[in-house]
Image: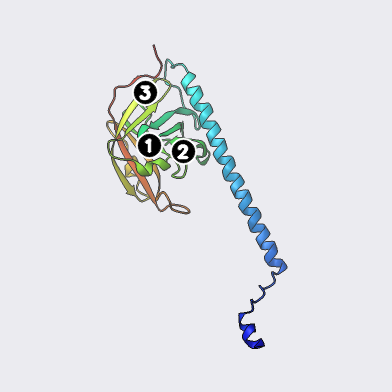
Amino acid sequence: MRNSLSLFAREAPPERTPMFRVISNILFAFGILALAYAGFLFADAHVYQAVQIQKLEQASPLAQPPHLADGDVLGEISLPRLQLEAVVVQGDSADDLKRAVGNLSNSALPGEHGNVALAAHRDTFFRPLRDIRVGDEIKFKTREHNFGYVVESMEVVAPSDISVLQPSTGHDLTLLTCYPFHYIGPAPKRFVVFAREIKPRNSSQPN
């Protein structure tokens, strides 16, 4: 009987070694720090976006287009159907993309002939692009003008494919982010949205 009962006896869990406890505590602390850092980045970007959008709405048009340095605010992009609104800055450095959508340094500016190329992270500002459709409207507001675009196509390309960023002879807009959207770690592909200008430019300020 004793042997039979011993078969059903619950084995005591193995005793954790001091080294195991140390490693567990380190991993737990690392997880807490990672969450805190992610929260800080989210809050910092949210505050930055709110402040810059308010400044943009209150700014007066300039007589001449300003010379933009890296990190300077260029305007605001919005996709009404996707409820996407984000500040756009000049440049695409890591610091720029933490807080805003970045206008690639060698691309055109809104209103110029050529390809306005904007990049953002897939897990922040450009995450709504996973639901974008052909025909969606894109708005781009600067201090001087409001620009309107319509989505013509989407494409998934390799990171080395820079042909999607080539200059054009029209007034085009290209949005670029990593793909797949739910991929863990550095994504292996790029998701590209192609759009063309459809509305005549208008002043962004009321008369």
Q: Is residue 203 in view?
A: yes
| Image mark for residue 173 | none
Q: Residues within 10 Å of mark 1 (few under 14, many from 20)?
A: some
Pointer 1: what residue? 82
Amino acid type shown at disc 3: Asn
Amino acid type shown at disc 2: Asp
* Contact? badges 2 and 1 (CB < 8 Å): no
Q: Residue 138: x, y in percent?
A: 34, 32
Q: Residue 80: x, y in percent?
A: 37, 32
Q: Residues within 10 Å of mark 2 (few under 14, many from 20)?
A: many
Q: Secondary structure at mark 1?
A: helix
Question: In this image, 113 relative to 16: left or right?
Answer: left
Q: CA distance from mark 1 to mark 3?
A: 19 Å
Q: Nearer the viewer, residue 120 or 11?
A: 11
Q: Earlier in the sequence, mark 3 or mark 2?
A: 2
Q: CA distance from mark 3 to mark 2?
A: 22 Å
Furthest toward the top, the residue is: 207
**Residue drawn at 40 percent across, 14 percent down:** 206
Q: Earlier in the sequence, mark 2 or mark 1?
A: 1
Pointer 3: what residue? 146
Q: Secondary structure at mark 3?
A: strand
**Residue drawn at 46 percent across, 21 percent down:** 57
Query: Which quarter shows the C terminus?
Result: top left
Q: Nearer the viewer, residue 27 or 102?
A: 27
Amino acid type shown at disc 1: Leu
Q: Is residue 19 above or below residue 103?
A: below
Q: Earlier in the sequence, mark 1 or mark 3?
A: 1
**Residue drawn at 36 percent across, 46 percent down:** 191
Pointer 2: what residue? 92
